[in-house]
Image (spheres, helix red, strand yellow):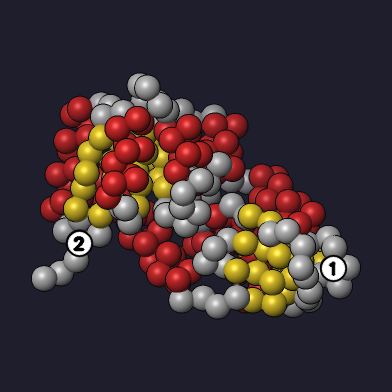
């Protein structure tokens, strides 16, 4: 018997939750719906889903608070936020606490399904990746951890980890900015060159103890990791 991918859907809008659950189940996913963040947290602990779809604005516990708590238990489970909020600061907050994708309401079910499959395929790549030596750092991509020699581990967000992984795979070559926005992260609705530079700056700070490592901004093209 085929094992179905388990999705935890936390959404307080009953009609939207019903349509979403029905659409996903028609694509052979197993969906558990929770009407608020507190119920969703308990369901996550009990049932170990493969992916989370979380509404941001929910009673009792909002989606961002729920994601923060879940990240204390699991660093790698993919999280998609659903929200009517579209301000850049809200999007950045969602990604900074460990979200992997962000879908603005109203959305098409086809788009949601494409993004779910995209994140699941990335997770499969993650599981099969070995630890990487970047200069004097050790990068554990599956666990999203960077370590300098024998010092304390540095935890990366999902996007930081994927960005570093792709920079390393293209080391000493230019990684195109458009590729990062559209292919690696799925879309470029909210991310601009400026916001991308913020992620690059964060990675530079986390790699600064090894002076032989540089991440260059190649103006008009993208970024280059030199090791």
* Residue where numbered disc 1 is placed: 210
Q: Nearer the viewer, residue 150 or 140?
A: 150
Left or right: 24 in relation to 149: left
Q: Nearer the viewer, residue 222 or 168?
A: 168
Q: Position of residue 110 (x, y in %)?
A: 26, 50
Q: Give residue 154's mark.
A: none
* Position of 217 relative to 94 (above/below): below
One can see residue 109 in this view = yes
Mark 2, other Cα within 10 Å: few <14 / some 14–19 / many ≥20 = few
* Position of 60 relative to 212 (above/below): above
Task: Please tell me in which quadrant of the rendered image residue 155 appears.
Answer: bottom right
Q: Position of residue 95 (x, y in %)?
A: 54, 44
Mark 1, other Cα within 10 Å: few <14 / some 14–19 / many ≥20 = some
Seen as rendered, the residue at the extreme left is 1
Left or right: 49 in relation to 209: left
Left or right: 17 in relation to 213: left
* Residue where numbered disc 2 is placed: 4
Q: Quadrant of the C terminus?
A: bottom right
Q: Residue at x 66, y 45 (%)?
A: 195
Q: Residue at x 83, y 60 (%)?
A: 208
Q: Position of residue 152 (x, y in %)?
A: 73, 58
Secondary element at image label 1: loop
Q: Position of residue 202 (x, y in %)?
A: 73, 51
């Amino acid at each position: 018997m085929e094992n179905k991918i388990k999705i935890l859907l936390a959404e307080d809008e009953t009609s939207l939750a019903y349509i979403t659950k029905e659409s996903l189940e028609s694509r052979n996913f197993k969906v558990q719906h929770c009407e608020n963040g507190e119920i969703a947290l308990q369901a996550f602990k009990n049932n170990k889903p493969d992916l989370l779809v979380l509404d941001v604005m929910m009673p009792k516990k909002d989606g961002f608070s729920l994601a923060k708590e879940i990240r204390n238990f699991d660093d790698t489970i993919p999280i998609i936020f659903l929200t009517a909020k579209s301000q850049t600061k809200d999007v950045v907050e969602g990604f900074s606490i460990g979200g992997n994708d962000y879908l603005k309401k109203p959305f098409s079910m086809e788009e949601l399904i494409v993004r779910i499959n995209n994140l699941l395929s990335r997770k499969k790549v993650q599981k099969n990746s070995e630890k990487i030596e970047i200069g004097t750092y050790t990068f554990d991509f599956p666990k999203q951890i960077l370590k300098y020699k024998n010092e304390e581990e540095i935890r990366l967000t999902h996007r930081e980890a994927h960005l570093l992984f792709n920079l390393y795979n293209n080391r000493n070559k230019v990684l195109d900015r458009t590729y990062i926005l559209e292919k690696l992260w799925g879309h470029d609705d909210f991310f601009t060159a400026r916001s991308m530079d913020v992620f690059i700056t964060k990675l530079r700070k986390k790699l600064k103890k090894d002076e032989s490592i540089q991440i260059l901004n190649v103006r008009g093209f993208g970024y280059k990791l030199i090791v």
